[in-house]
Image (cartoon, rainbow, N blue to C red):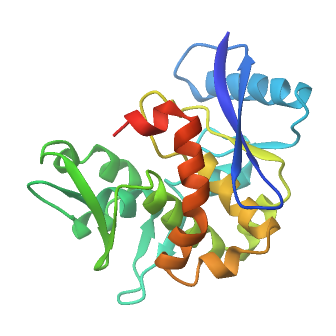
Amino acid sequence: MAKRFVYVPTDGEPGVKEVEVEFEWFPGFSVSQKQKSISALHCAADEAGFHPILEISSKSEDEQGVRASAFNLSFLTKSSNRKVSVESAFQGSKVFAFAGPFPDMYDMTAREAKREIRVRQNGTLTKFSFFGKDFPLRPRTLFYDWLYINTLHKDEELSSDMCQFAGFSDIEFNPEKSVNCQAFSAALYVSLVRCGMIAQVLESVDAFKEILTPFYESREINNPLQRSLI
C-alpha cells in the first residue's frame, strides 16, 4: 500500500484541500505500472467522494493530464516568440548564491533543464528571476504556482477542460522531498476560476501574492513539510 495526495479545489475562497489517500501500489518503473498505481489511486479517491480526478503527469492516461504536465505545458515569449515549457522556465529562473538565473535554459527541453548540473552546484537558492522580475522564496510555491497558472490560463481549451475535474493527482510527487507540485497548482487555478478571481490575480505578480498570501500562510502553519523543505 502507498499514500499520495489528491488536490481538490476549494470554493468560496481560493485554496486547495490536500486529501491523503491510501491505495494499492504497483512497483516498477514502466509506464504501465505507473498507470496501474494511478488507477488504484483514483479508485480510492472515488470511494472517498472525489470524482473525477485527473492525473497531471507524462504518465497520465488522459490527454489533458499529459498536456498539463509542466514538462509539456508551454508559453511563447513576447520578445522572440520562443516556446518555453513551465519546467524549463522554472529551472532557468533559479538564482543561487554563486550563479543564476540561467535564461539559456529556457531553450532546453524540460528534461534537459531538470537535469542541468548548474542548478545543483552553485550554492543556496536565494530567489527566482524571470525576465527581469524577481520572486522571493516565500511563500514557498509562489513562483511555481504563478508560472504554472499564467501558462495554463493562456490555453483556453485546456484550462476550460481542467475546470471539469473534482481534483488532481501527480503520482510522482513526494511532499517529503519536493515543494512544488503541478497537481496542486492546477487545483489552485481551478479554485481561482470558481471563485471568480482568476483575472484579478493575473493582473500582476503583486496582486497574485496579495490575494493568495493568506492561503499560503495558513497552508504552512498546517503543513510542517512546507516549513521545513528547501
Look at the picture and state if 150 lies above or below 120.
below
Q: Is residue 69 visible?
A: no
Against 69, residue 225 (above or below) is above
Q: Position of residue 33 (x, y in %)?
A: 64, 21
Q: Position of residue 3 (x, y in %)?
A: 65, 20
Q: Residue at x 58, y 44 (%)?
A: 219
Locate residue 190 relative to residue 120 in the image: left or right: right
The quadrant the C terminus occupies is: top left
- Residue situated in front as seen by the camera: 131 or 228: 228
Taking the image as shown, residue 58 lies to the left or right of residue 88, namely right
Residue 130 spot, x, y in % from top left: 33, 72
Which of 94/97 is in front?
97
Residue located 86% across and 37% down the image: 50
Where 24 sits versus 147, above or below? above
Q: Identify which residue is drawn at 67% across, 9% down.
A: 1
Compared with 198, 7 (above or below) is above
The residue positioned 47% from the left and 76% from the top of the image is: 205
